Image (tube, rainbow, N blue to C red):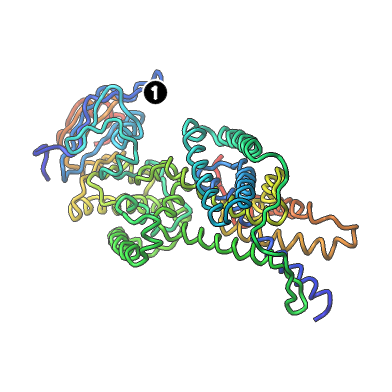
Amino acid sequence: MSETLLFALELTISGLLVGLMYSLVALGFVLIYKASGVFNFAQGDMTFLAALALASFVVKIPLWISLIVVLAIMLILAMAVERIVLKPLVARPPLVLFMATIGVAFFLQGLAQGIWGTQPRGLELGLADQTYDVAGMFISNMDILGAVVAGILLIALVWFFQKTKTGRALRAVSDDHEAALAVGIPLRKAWGITWAIAGIVAIVAGALWGSRVGVQASLALLALKALPVLIIGGIDSIPGAILGGLIIGAAENLAEGLIGPAVGGGIKNFFPYLLALIVLAVRPYGLFGREIIERV
Amino acid sequence: MPDGVGRPLLKVNNVYVSFGALQALLGVSLEIYPGEIFAIIGPNGAGKTTLINVISGVYHPSPGEVFFEGKERTFMPPHHVAALGIARTFQNVALFKGMTTLDNLMVGRHLQMRSGLFASGVYWGWGQKEEIAHRKVVEDVIDFLEIEAIRKAPAGMLPYGLQKRVELGRALAAEPKLLLLDEPMAGMNLEEKEDIARFILDANEERGTTICLIEHDMGVVMDISDRILVLDYGRKIAEGAPEEIRSNPEVIKAYLGAHGKK
């Protein structure tokens, strides 16, 4: 195998591993969008809040207890958002709900920093950073851990949505609110469950990303990384979010490694958006999004 | 069919509904008895769909009362009304378009399913057994409506006539005590209308479902209904058996006369 090919393969594999973690962040958006038709601006800040809470607990109490405490916080948060923010806004246009999530985002950012301070923190999950040599390719154990955890959560969510009564009910809600009510599915309960799941996704994403890049307010900007994933995969598609993340992860790594040196490097950060623009031009609904045909 | 005997399944008492200055319903009362096919007819804008929406809990009357099986439930929200055993279809098809026909019908059984996430996840065996039991009911409805061929097709991809049929299937899968059909044959050709009329009659006779329907096609309504209520401008102008309605001068003036039929 030639050097370049091996290098490309290495870039692809590590890109795909990171890509699964992008999928995870994007999935938080997809879940809430599907259930309520709202782009949840607060998803990034939920991730930040979860990561910051975890980082501050984990230095005092064992990891698994910290995770349970953070889980409780996120579940309470989901219920509070449903009661205080969503309930009064039922049947308002999506834009109103979107604005409300911007409010939630700033509130969470302030709340997290008010309680735990603005200092950047490290998040130790008790795993030393190691690199393995697999058939001449270097692969980080953090990448593998991240991919495995993200992969398990993704599989669990797909199973939940396809195979359980509650999952089926949530899919029904995302398709048609009126019909969901008519078959006896309570909308508000469904929204509460959806936000709780988005909270759980935020915990896992926050823990994985926080342990890689540290926990600071800019972690919330991770949400920006989810945007090209959503555009490529389609904002209403769970498989789209997974594949979109993998595509972005592999593509940005390959671009940086192969094209980067020729143009002076540093293209990793904007390449996903370039890719998203191309997809927007060719397939505005994303690769897997549902095409909406409207009568005029 | 029991016409006006015994205790009514549903009783709507002196219901008013208004949207701003528009009076949609003005003191409408009706009683639907177990086992009958009850039709609501009237010109466009007469308040038929509003009345269905009052029965299914989408709108709440003021003033007015709604009783189901003798208990008042005037202000119940739609998902609680569904839990009482009242299923419905919509005038402009409200299906779960991204889901398959089978899944649409399974969601129709949502309220009959007890095992939540916990049971289907932890008590694997029990959850699976329950799922199989529900699948059987759903498969029976699929057989009944002759939609075996489209079981795995996404509902949104189906032609309009079949979407209407799947929606009827979703309502039947709930094994409702009262089935509300809002224009089940709208936009269908003659053959499709005959199919749906047959399904409605069979659902009533074989499955014993009490049915309340809105329909524009007078011929079909006269053929399949036990009793008919006629609305005009939010008021009840007549109620009775098809023969009485057909010869009622007020109905002819308000509705039939306008169309020049029969």
Q: What secondary structure is found at the residue carrying circle 1?
A: strand
Which residue is at a point 78% across and 55% down the rendered structure image? Answer: A271
Subunit of label 1: B
B239 displayed left or right of A245: left
Towards the viewer: B6 or B49 = B6
Question: Would residue B174 appear left or right of A175 to someone viewing this image?
Answer: left
Q: Which of A12 and B228 is in front in this view?
A: A12
Q: In this view, does A9 lie above or below B41?
A: below
Horizontal and vertical percent for residue B30?
20, 31
Residue B197: give x, y in percent of width and height.
26, 50
| Badge 1: residue crowd in 10 Å (few <14, some 14–19, many ≥20) | few
> Is residue A206 visible to the viewer in this orientation of the structure?
no
Quadrant location of the N terminus of chain A in the rendered image: bottom right
Residue in front for this viewpoint, A154 or B198: A154
Vertically, is A21 above or below B92? below
Residue furthest to the bottom = A1
Q: Residue furthest left?
A: B5
Residue B119 in the image, given as x and y percentages of width and height = 36, 59
Q: Which residue sits at x=17%, y=52%? A: B205
Q: Name the residue under label 1.
A: B19
Q: What residue type is labelled 1?
A: Phe
Residue A111 seen in render:
yes
Q: In this view, does A132 lie above or below A25?
A: below
B145 vs A108, nearest the viewer: A108
Q: Quadrant of residue A8?
A: bottom right
